[in-house]
């Protein structure tokens, strides 16, 4: 995580966001249990990638007074 420029709390937040998205998607998806698990996993991974990308952009371009 340090090589990307992310702090320890960013890693914790990433896991929290990915876990919540995974659980909510799996709970609300239609289909069999296997389909729900796969849909939740894919949504969780995608949200994790988006979280890392947006966090990196914020860290790079945020004003100095933040």
Image (tube, rainbow, N blue to C red):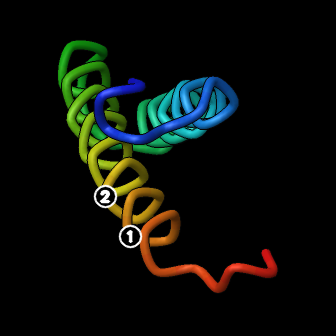
Counting from the top left corner in percent of width and height, residue 55 is at: 47, 58
Crowding around mark 2 (Cα neighbors within 10 Å: few <14, some 14 to 19, many 20+) is few
Query: Which residue is label 2 attached to?
Result: 53
Mark 2, secondary structure of its residue:
helix
Determine whether 15 is above or below 20 in the image.
above
Answer yes or no: do the residues labelled 2 and 1 have beta carbons within 8 Å? yes
Rendered location of residue 12, percent (x, y):
64, 24
Residue at 48 percent across and 38 percent down: it is 6
Which is in the foreground here, disc 2 or disc 1?
Answer: 1
28 vs 61, nearest the viewer: 61
Quarter of the picture containing the C terminus is: bottom right
Disc 1 marks which residue?
57
Q: Determine the CA span between mark 2 and mark 1.
A: 6 Å
Kindly indicate the quadrant of the structure image that contains residue 5: top left
Q: Is residue 9 above or below residue 50?
A: above
Picture residue at 36% right of the left edge, 36% below the top: 44
Compared across the picture, whether 41 is left or right of 57 comes to left
Asked whether, in this view, residue 46 is left or right of residue 65, the answer is left
Going by the picture, which residue comes out furthest to the front? 64
Residue 36 falls in image quadrant: top left
Indicate the secondary structure of the residue bearing disc 1.
Answer: helix
Residue 37 in picture, x, y percent from top left: 30, 19
Instruction: Residue 29: give x, y in percent of width and height.
Output: 37, 43
Give the class, few, some or many, for how many residues have Cα within 10 Å of label 1's Cα (few <14, many ≥20).
few
């Amino acid at each position: 995580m340090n090589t990307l420029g992310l702090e320890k709390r960013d890693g914790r937040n990433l896991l929290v966001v990915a876990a919540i998205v995974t659980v909510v998607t799996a709970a609300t998806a239609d289909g069999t249990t296997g389909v729900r698990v796969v849909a939740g996993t894919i949504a969780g991974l995608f949200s994790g990638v988006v979280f890392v990308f947006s966090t990196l952009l914020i860290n790079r371009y945020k004003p100095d007074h933040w």
